[in-house]
Amino acid sequence: MKKKNVKRLVVINSLKKKEFLLLDDVVYLEASDNSTFIYLVGDRKITVDISLKECTLRINDCYFRRVCKSFVINVNQVATFDKTKSAILFHHNMQIKLPKEQHQAFQELLEELCICM
């Protein structure tokens, strides 16, 4: 039996509803005290009441990588790394600033996960 391409889902629980998100639609996550902002394709943002560390553990996907203290990114959503502006630009016109001391580690991450030309 052939294995189908299964899309991984993230379930966000709140008091009023359960929301089902495709993991591929997550662009990046941002720490905010003991909460985490989840930024999605389509300029959507969801807040969850768990830490960035806990979100990362629950997602447990090799393409979601912590690039600094405040951000975990979906490497599949990266469009450009602007070294001069110290910015990671994503598809869908989103961007985050990366601390300059993290440049080398981020470039090594890209080399590990991507085909570089």
Image (tube, rainbow, N blue to C red):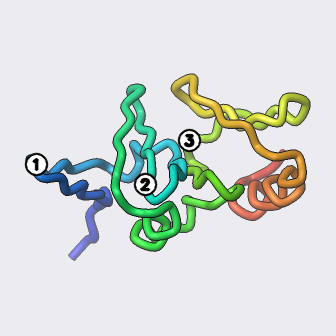
Q: Quadrant of the C terminus?
A: top right
Q: Nearer the viewer, mark 2 or mark 3?
A: 2
Q: At x 34% / y 57%, what residue is drawn?
A: 49
The residue pinned by badge 1 equals: 17
Above or below, comparing residue 89 to residue 23 in the picture: above
Q: Nearer the viewer, mark 3 or mark 1?
A: 1
Which numbered dot is residue 35? Answer: 2
Q: Nearer the viewer, mark 2 or mark 1?
A: 2
State the separation of the CA atoms marked 2 and 1: 18 Å
Q: As drawn, which residue projects farthest toward the left?
A: 16
Q: At x 51% / y 49%, what residue is drawn?
A: 32
CB-based contact (under 8 Å), mark 3 and mark 1: no
Q: Amino acid at mark 3?
A: Gln
CB-based contact (under 8 Å), mark 2 and mark 3: no
The residue pinned by badge 3 equals: 77
First in sequence, mark 3 or 1: give its number: 1
